[in-house]
Image (tube, rainbow, N blue to C red):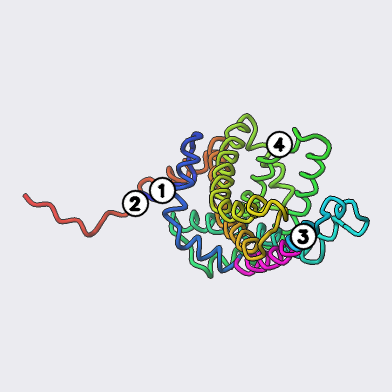
Amino acid sequence: MTKKIELSKIRDFGELITDSFIFARQNLKPLLSAFFVFCGFFLVAGAITASLQQIKVAHSVNSVFDSATAPSSFRSSSYNPFSFFGIEYLLSILFIWLNYVSMTLVVFSFIALYKEKGNIAPTLPEVWGYFKYFFFRILGSSILLAILMGIAFVLCIIPGIYLYPIMGLVYPIMVFENSSLGYAFNKSFRLIKERWWLTAGSLFVMFLILYIATVIIVLPTTIINLSSMFLHPGKGMHLSAVLTIITTLLQHLCEVLVILPLITISLCYFNLNEVREGTGLMERISKLGNTKPDDNLAGEEY
């Protein structure tokens, strides 16, 4: 049996990646259970509203290309490109945001309890206790951090790239240390000092894996849907409502894969915290001599 992952440990780049997959595999069932129980509503609601919005887009595109004078339709004053953005679009964005906050909190709550219980997966009621305690704190913080990241990317892309791994550490600090946003924000800068590349590189690789996996899952239906322009060149593009819905549902289902980079950023936190403060080492030292002997061992024979 594979040994349980020890969270408070110094790791190099390769260990951060491999241990993320090992932790996910060892705790796959309880992790997925917590994800779908606490994020399922937002995931389903987001998929439904996004599907409705994509159907509207497909209908608008088809109505343009169904006309024999497609180019003139684009130039027509009656064509409104902003018609794509209605209440469905706003609700879709809202549910995507709430789902992101929820799954971030679920994964970090799960890992915090896993460490607290001595490398044992927590139960759903235990995760719910953390979830309801931190939800509005993380929700409010996500708004402020999103504004900050938006400003950083608008002013110049480089500050946004630099801040991204630092902002990623804020949420685990808030959950693992039960801290405020201000404390977590300041500590994330202290932790990542001189180890920015390790953290940023680990997150980049995990999100790249996430992106590739999503493309592989969604690409078949997307290709079939777009192939209509080659099958019926005279009509131009004609998007299928059914395939559009399937593609949208698959995209939302792939959000479960975000669990992996969330595990990685958690391991990055424990790695950086261990380098600077050595908390895991101190915990192991304090346990020396406190290990109970195994009473099931056979007695000595002479």
Image position of 90 with respect to 4: above or below: below
In this rendering, which labeled residue sits more in front, label 3 or label 2? Answer: 3
> Residue 53, position in %: x, y?
74, 63
How far is mark 1 from mark 3, CA to CA? 73 Å
Tag 3: residue type? Asp
SS class, disc 3: loop
In this rendering, which labeled residue sits more in front, label 1 or label 4? Answer: 4
Residue to which mark 2 is pinned: 291
Q: Kindly indicate the quadrant of the structure image that contains residue 139.
A: bottom right
SS class, disc 2: loop
Mark 3, Cα crowd under 10 Å, few <14 / some 14-19 / many 20+, is some
Image position of 61 with respect to 182: above or below: below
SS class, disc 1: loop
In this rendering, which labeled residue sits more in front, label 1 or label 3? Answer: 3
In the rendered structure, which segment of residues is drawn in magenta?
40-57
97 and 119: which one is in front?
97
- Image point (72%, 67%), residue name: 52
In this rendering, which labeled residue sits more in front, label 4 or label 2? Answer: 4
Residue to which mark 4 is pinned: 161
- Image point (35%, 47%), residue name: 289
The secondary structure that dominates the magenta segment is helix
Of the image marks 3 and 2, the number of the one nearer the N terminus: 3
How far is mark 4 from mark 2, CA to CA? 46 Å
In this rendering, which labeled residue sits more in front, label 3 or label 4? Answer: 3
Residue to which mark 1 is pinned: 287
Tag 2: residue type? Thr
Tag 1: residue type? Lys
Residue to which mark 3 is pinned: 66
Image position of 192 with respect to 4: above or below: above
